[in-house]
């Protein structure tokens, strides 16, 4: 310790001590992490210090750089404001959405309730609320997907039953499906003037309100997780609604990549809704041009790196598959730099598998992530 103080003495003793205390804190955080999560929070050597061509979210629009936490608050507000403007206006948020219990059954000691949830002032959706036996002061997770049956393990689709597996681990979970029942033809509130993917983020905000008002849920410990379409939904939900304590997204495509058919943010059911032109589905080409907010985002040089930087300093996990391979660390490294500038490390993590489909190993890390960041009460930064 004394040697390190000497090495840093040219910064001044007070600054040197501050650096050492920060390093001590980071070391403590790393030691506290489960080994698999700690490993996932460090880029492979091949991708360390690699940033690709992505623009740093630490740069303001005018090119000046974030220097401290106060600067980041201003930069974060700048990012959020521009994305909200481009994605369009949400309907009014619901302070206390209605929750109607349609039926209730017991599964392995877990209460499974079929529920009807208010997701907008003029719209409801049916889904499932799973409540563990010891229902008091619990963490909770919102699980969006095409339909809620898959998330609670009633559809026979392997490794996609996040809500059921988390409930077995002591979490309250709420599962909802696409508004209107068809992900490619989403039904939005008459008061919505936004892109469909932003509308899903709006639903996520109201789902948070539903969980936060349950008497047995700790509102400071609510997370969100989804796979593929649900992964896009979870990512936008967590990034645009900062009350989520943490989030995990499974292979959604965490950057804009027009070479990948499944990273299809250009589609009208995501970010390409355009009142003047409905594009044919598929990769961007001369006869399938960019439309809607997606076109403007690309033209202005925006990418999902900015969006995910809005998470800082909240933890998030990318459960990467075919769409999010290890090279995505080039994007995540820019986001890690934001966390490090705020004095936090080991809060941005990524696992990788070859297939788009989740598997036992990738899902186990998701559950470990939530158990670590939500099961224990932690102060919000």
Image: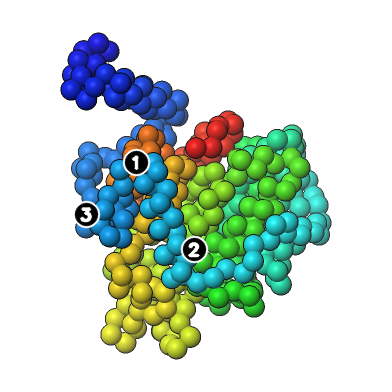
Position of residue 187 relative to residue 343, above or below, is: below
Residue in the image at 34% along x and 41% along y: 68
The residue pinned by badge 3 equals: 52
Whole-percent x, y for residue 220 in the image:
61, 40
Badge number at residue 229: 2
Position in image of residue 202 (x %, y %): 58, 63
Q: Are marks 1 and 2 in contact (CB under 8 Å)?
A: no
With 353 as the anchor, is 54 left or right in this view? left
Observer able to see residue 16: yes
Say whether residue 221 is left or right of residue 296: right
Q: In the image, what residue occupies the spot 35% across and 26% down?
A: 22
Element assignment for label 3: loop
Closer to the camera in the image, 338 or 362: 338
- Choose mark 1 or mark 2, whichever is in front: 1
Of 57 and 212, nearer the camera is 57
Q: Nearer the viewer, mark 1 or mark 3?
A: 1
**Residue named by callout 1:** 68
Residue 192: x and y in percent read: 59, 74
Decide: is 34 above or below 230: above
Q: Quadrant of residue 264?
A: bottom left
Question: Are the residues flagged by discs 1 and 3 in contact, CB closer than 8 Å?
Answer: no
Q: Is residue 55 left or right of residue 92?
A: left
Secondary structure beneath dot 2 equals: helix
The residue drawn where x is 50% and y is 57% is: 240
Could you give the CA–CA distance between mark 2 and mark 3, rounded to whole angstroms?
Answer: 26 Å
């Amino acid at each position: 310790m004394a040697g390190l103080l000497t090495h840093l003495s040219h910064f001044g003793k007070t600054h040197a001590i501050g650096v050492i205390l920060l390093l001590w804190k980071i070391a403590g955080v790393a030691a506290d992490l489960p080994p698999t999560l700690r490993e996932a929070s460090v880029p492979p050597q091949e991708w360390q210090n690699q940033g690709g061509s992505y623009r740093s979210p630490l740069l303001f629009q005018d090119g000046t750089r974030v220097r401290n936490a106060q600067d980041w608050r201003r930069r974060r507000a700048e990012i959020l404001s521009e994305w909200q403007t481009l994605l369009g206006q949400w309907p009014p948020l619901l302070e206390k959405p209605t929750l109607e219990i349609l039926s209730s059954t017991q599964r392995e000691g877990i209460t499974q309730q079929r529920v009807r949830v208010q997701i907008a002032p003029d719209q409801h959706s049916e889904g499932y609320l799973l409540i563990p036996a010891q229902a008091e002061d619990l963490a909770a997770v919102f699980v969006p997907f095409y339909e809620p049956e898959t998330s609670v393990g009633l559809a026979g689709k392997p490794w996609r039953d996040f809500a059921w597996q988390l409930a077995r681990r002591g979490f309250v979970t709420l599962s909802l499906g696409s508004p209107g029942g068809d992900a490619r033809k989403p039904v939005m509130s008459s008061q919505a003037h936004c892109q469909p993917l932003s509308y899903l983020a709006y639903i996520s905000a109201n789902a948070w309100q539903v969980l936060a008002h349950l008497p047995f849920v700790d509102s400071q410990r609510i997370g969100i997780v989804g796979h593929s379409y649900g992964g896009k939904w979870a990512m936008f939900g967590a990034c645009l609604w900062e009350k989520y304590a943490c989030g995990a997204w499974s292979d959604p495509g965490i950057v804009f990549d027009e070479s990948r058919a499944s990273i299809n943010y250009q589609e009208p059911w995501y970010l390409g809704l355009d009142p003047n032109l409905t594009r044919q589905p598929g990769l961007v080409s001369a006869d399938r041009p960019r439309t809607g907010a997606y076109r403007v985002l690309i033209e202005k040089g925006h990418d999902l790196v900015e969006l995910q930087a809005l998470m800082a300093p909240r933890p998030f996990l990318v459960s990467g598959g075919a769409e999010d391979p290890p090279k995505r660390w080039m994007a995540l490294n820019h986001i890690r730099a934001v966390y490090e500038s705020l004095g936090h490390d080991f809060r941005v993590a990524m696992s990788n598998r070859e297939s788009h489909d989740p598997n036992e190993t990738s899902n186990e890390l998701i559950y470990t992530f939530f158990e670590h960041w939500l099961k224990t009460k932690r102060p919000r930064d």
